[in-house]
Amino acid sequence: MINLYRSIALQILMIEDNKDHAFLTLKMLERSFPAARIEIAETAAQAFEKVSAQPWDIILSDYNLPDKDGLSILKELKERNCDIPFVIMTGAGDEKLAVEAMQAGAYNYLVKDEVYLSTLPRVIQDAMVKHADRKERERLQQEIREKNFALERANEELKKLDQLKSEFIASVSHEFRTPLNSIRESIALISEGVVKLGDKQGDRVFEIAKNNVNRLALLIDDLLDFAKLEAGRMRMDKQQYDMLLIIQEVIDSMKGLAEKKGIKLVCQPDSSRPFIHADKSRLVQVLMNLVDNAIKFTPPGGSITVHMAAKGSQVKVAVEDTGVGIPSDHLVKIFDKFEQVRYHHPGTEIRGTGLGLAISKQIVELHGGQIWAESEAGKGSKFVFTLPTGSV
């Protein structure tokens, strides 16, 4: 039989109190496994010291020892979670003891007869092979369990994603239908002569149709931007800009909408004037979305404040409102793809598509920044993002 372990530096621990048996066994092991390191423990106590001190590839133990028998040593090693191949050797054969040893986890049970020294190398090799096979089986079983668990989680995520997509499609369909119905009804009123352009009612109907066309255009732009971001095809035209001027531009654009609803919109920057390397149009898009959401979810008489502060190599921008707030359990997922958060307010329910925040998050991250939300239901919201300052 080929000795697979002859040239391997095995770590062999022999527990044997009989010096003659120990000497003969040692010589045989040195011939069969010349690269091995072999140590002898005469008692169980010595054996446990050696096991604690270093790793071992295999333990050969006599059954009858001064302080403990070999079976008790094996059981204690198992209790200590020491997974080492263990072979029991005894001077007297006992079938019941052999069965008990194997059930306790021994790899073999060897009677010290006239041929045991010649068979011991094969027993050691069989034990090592068996141990390696068992460890490999356990590794593969664990790998299978982990992959099954990962597949189950992936399946659950796919189910959730499918549900979110269905809700998203339903929401976007609603978002399209509402302005389309308004446009159709407005055109019908004008074409059928119910109202005339140039008089007050006709101009009002025309204004409704125009506003809804703009609403549809914005929704289509969001869908196209989202598709570009998902495909990694959104290009950034980055240049140096004064962050405060970008914020002021957005506030000037949105102030009329806020005032129309009776909401105060102000900017509160610190004394710094940080410059950023960014795509201005995309940052305006992010700020417009955050301010528009704040206006949408803030009741008349409320206020929206855009804060800006530079610290170190970052600028921090926050859009804070006194609106209806966001439930705390929604904060961690409002930037997720296809997530739609329902904002509860007395007498109504406001619902967002989730597109704007998902797009904003990806734009901020493409600029090397971070974005997050702080809020409690009924206590207003604060959307914060950071960007690196300076040139790139």
Image (tube, helix red, strand yellow):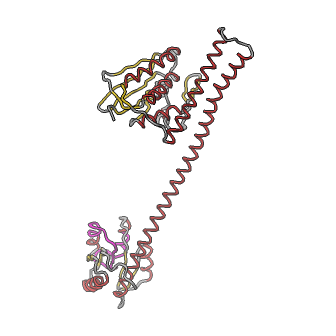
| Nearer the observer, 71 or 368 | 368
Give x and y (percent) for residue 310: 32, 27
Q: Tell me the quarter of the picture where residue 120 sits.
A: bottom left
The stretch in magenta equals 48-76
| Nearer the observer, 130 or 19 | 130
* Horizontal side of residue 47 vs 129, given as left or right: left
**Where, quadrant-wise, is the N terminus in this rendering?**
bottom left
Q: Tell me the quarter of the picture where residue 62 sits.
A: bottom left
Give x and y (percent) for residue 117: 33, 87
Is-magenta flag for residue 71?
yes
What residue is drawn where x is 48% and y is 19%?
254
Q: Tell me the quarter of the picture where residue 51 sits.
A: bottom left
Give x and y (percent) for residue 349: 58, 26
| Nearer the observer, 128 or 319 | 319
Relative vertical location of residue 217 with respect to residue 303 in this rendering, above or below: below
What residue is drawn where x is 61% and y is 36%?
169
